[in-house]
Image (cartoon, helix red, strand yellow):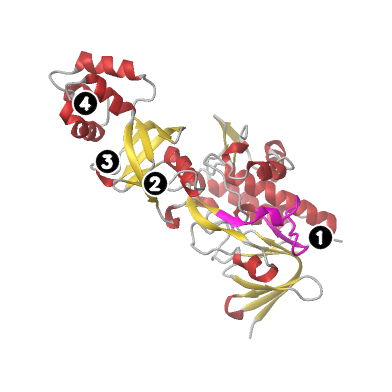
Amino acid sequence: MSKFLGEFDVAVIGGGAAGLFVASQLKSGVNCAILECNDRVGKKLLATGNGKCNLSAYPLDFSKYNNPEFAKSIISQCDFERTSAIFAQMGLLIKNVDGRVYPYSESAATVLETLRRAVAGKGAQTFTSCRVESINRPANGFELVGEGAKFTLKCKKVVLATGSDATFGRDSASLYERAFGHSSTPRWPSLVPIRTERRAVKGLDGVRAKVALTLNGRRECGEALFKDFGISGIAAFNLSAMIARGRVGVGDVIYVDFLPEYGENEVAQWLETHMCGDVTAALAGMLHSRIAARIYDEAKDYSHDARKVARLLKNYPLTVEGLCDRSLAQVMCGGLDVEQFDLNLDSKLAEGAYAVGEALDIDGECGGYNLQWAWSSAYVAARHMNENLK
């Protein structure tokens, strides 16, 4: 027999960044329940930004979202300044580091604890290890049913805040598809390592280097982490979003610039000055030893030609073979069709059913874009519910 968890004004499905922020922004007196399928809330948030929690970017570049116009229409209602003010009111001190916004502590645990205190202050109840399997629509509001009919819960408003399930491998957009007839775009891993032709990265597994990567005219500068299957790191992650969104694909070529601060002519002149018969000695003074060995192996047929070697150093080709699976992805492309939600993120097919964060077909690149979307979308939904709940 299922356990009845109670009747609530608002039920938030998902206790991640967006779900917690929704609950924190509901007005006093709103009876809220958070249902989290894991054994604790905020599990994915703790891993954000390698544990530093890149909260936002300032200024925001909306072109870094897959649907920039819709993202802008929501984020403009709760922009960086408003988000910062909300966090300051909660007691979270933040800082801007070269356009990337972090908690001053540079610890995701600080953000999670701040959100948990804010949610507790509003009197919300949190139920962990509760995975919602289906949603029914009785006469007034909604009824949530747990996996295996282990529990039921009734509410006036429901919010889908399950994220993209990039980490845990289960897409709950189907809850709204089954219950309300919503449609969604298939999920694809994004912000994920890129698989490339293995020969081109032979011997480089574990090597980190500051490089520039170019794919189909898009150039990304930053740290690259080479793997035996391809390439990872922030620069590669941002290019992976292009692949996930179908703008480029298998067979396209990523060109690695191992010396992005120098022009090709400068590199050639350096090589000509320091090479002794072949380029080995010159490479040894320029690059990580294993990158130097890889370049020499690739250029051994023309190692005496400084111009050709310089061109290779500035345009080292990696042929794309695909993306790594969702277990390594920071976010997932795809999700619920945003055209089926209004600018309050209330469903056009089932009034009172909201979706926020990555449950919707909105994803951004690295640098705080996905968390800013989580905060802004959660705020917009909470504000609308505050206006409509008696």
Which numbered tag is attached to residue 284?
A: 4
Residue 179 screen position, x and y as percent:
68, 70
The residue carrying mark 1 is 29
Residue 263 screen position, x and y as percent:
36, 19
Q: Earlier in the sequence, mark 2 or mark 4?
A: 2
SS of the residue under disc 3: helix
Q: Residues within 10 Å of mark 3 (few under 14, many from 20)?
A: some
Q: Earlier in the sequence, mark 1 or mark 3?
A: 1
Q: Earlier in the sequence, mark 3 or mark 2?
A: 2
Q: Over which residues does the magenta segment extend?
A: 334-356
Q: Earlier in the sequence, mark 2 or mark 1?
A: 1
Q: Give the foreground label among 2 and 4.
A: 2
Q: Earlier in the sequence, mark 4 or mark 1?
A: 1
SS of the residue under disc 2: strand
> CB atoms at circles 3 and 2 under 8 Å apart?
no
Q: Main secondary structure of the magenta part?
A: loop
